[in-house]
Amino acid sequence: MSTATQIIHSIPVDPLTGAISVPIYQTSTFVQDAPGVNKGYDYARSGNPTRAALETLIAQLENGSVGLAFGSGLAAIDAVIKLLKSGDEILAVDDIYGGAFRLFTQVYEKFGITVNYADATNAENVFNALTPKTKLIWIETPTNPTLKISDIQAIAKIAKAQNCLLCVDNTFASPALQQPLSLGADIVVHSATKYLGGHSDLIAGIVVTKDPELGAKIKFYQNACGNILSPFDSWLVIRGIETLHLRIKQHCSSAQAVAEFLETHPAVDKVFYPGLKSHPNHDIAKKQSKGFGGIVSFTLKNDTEEAAISFVTNTKLFKLAESLGGIKSLLCHPANMTHKTIPATKRRAAGVADSLIRLSIGLEDAEDLINDLENTFEIIQTSKVKSKKAEYVNRQ
Ligand SMILES: Cc1ncc(COP(=O)(O)O)c(C=O)c1O
């Protein structure tokens, strides 16, 4: 059976009524026959049938045993970090998502959890950066926003040998393209706000574990700390997942066309897209995922924040916004938006140049998107329109 068929039929038909769409159980509590005697649910923070349907579905899609849904991607990341204790160390990929960097350094470091960073595109760097205190290796692949690729299988072997956990942020690939748990990772996290939801209409997070015991520990934190996903948002994520395969196919093919166009444009310096043969880890991306995703980043030959801001404020179809993975194309300037919390020297060292622009390729026609980019290059080159230098507020 193909994965698309499997996904669609993993979404249960309601056993009580036969409803083909998972019902939204909008309730805070469940009536009990006697104290502790109930129909599987007692209080909706601990468990809710709509959220449970999503959690079972995503565990299946990621080939794991336990799935858990949280109020945001960061809440999902937070629940995983709670597995650690004071004195433990995390080894994280160096161009990690800015919000995860902020959580690690501004929240968890004061509780005695130290974070070290390594360029994970070469598994040897990860091995060399481990210390006896490393308890968790944290990678994103592809990374946000430079689309770096790490070899999940090779890093999973290193994690096993060191007796530490490997967590993969699979937000950019989605399970339609890549299943880290099948490649040896222990935990997968998602900002379900992105491709899983797919319509830019919710904030949600997911954790999936391979091992049931590890999943039970994180489930304990989900209930004890209370950062759960609401029934309605759980339903929206389920509905998003129903079309995940179809959407991802289109995102990938349009992103490939856009990346190839950008590679030939004289104003562009570098293009970051794992589907390009010029990408340094194109072969690993090909080996571990079924496609290369819908995000393309590029830098300008005029490597200034001003040039990038002029570009991102002059496109018509690409809307300037945080986030990615929805049906409408978005673009952003990471140095001033998603990665603003990372110090400039550290940001540049991780490859996030001042002029780097990230595109989230939506479901519009690829040709229209390329025309929009081409027109914008013309506008900024002839300086027909002055930069509408916006004041960006870091909301993520
Ligand atoms: C790779 C990655 N992980 C996690 C997050 C955090 O997710 P959320 O915004 O749903 O909290 C983001 C958000 O942009 C992200 O890009």
Image: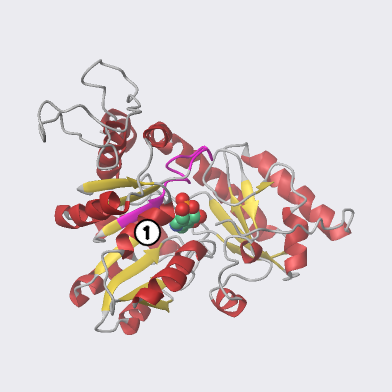
Is 298 on the left-hand or right-hand side of 105?
A: right
Q: Quarter-wise, where is residue 382 in the image?
A: bottom right
Relative to 177, say whether 234 is above or below: above
On-image quarter of the C terminus: bottom right
- The residue that appears at 28% across and 58% down in the rendered structure is 187
Residue 196 lies in the magenta stretch: yes
Q: In the rendered structure, which segment of residues is drawn in magenta?
A: 188-202
Whether disc 1's CB lies below 8 Å from ligand 1 is answered yes
Magenta highlight: main SS: loop
Q: Name the quadrant containing residue 88.
A: bottom left
Q: Looking at the image, can residue 292 be seen?
A: no
Number of numbered labels in the structure image? 1
Residue at x 45% of width, y 73% of height: 105
Residue identified by numbered label 1 = 77
Q: Quadrant of the N terminus?
A: top left
Q: Residue 336: where, in percent of width, then height? A: 65, 64
**Percent position (x, y) of residue 278?**
54, 65
**Horizontal side, residue 258 vs residue 278: left or right:** right
Left or right: 316 in relation to 81: right
What residue is rendered at 60% in x and 39% in y? 328
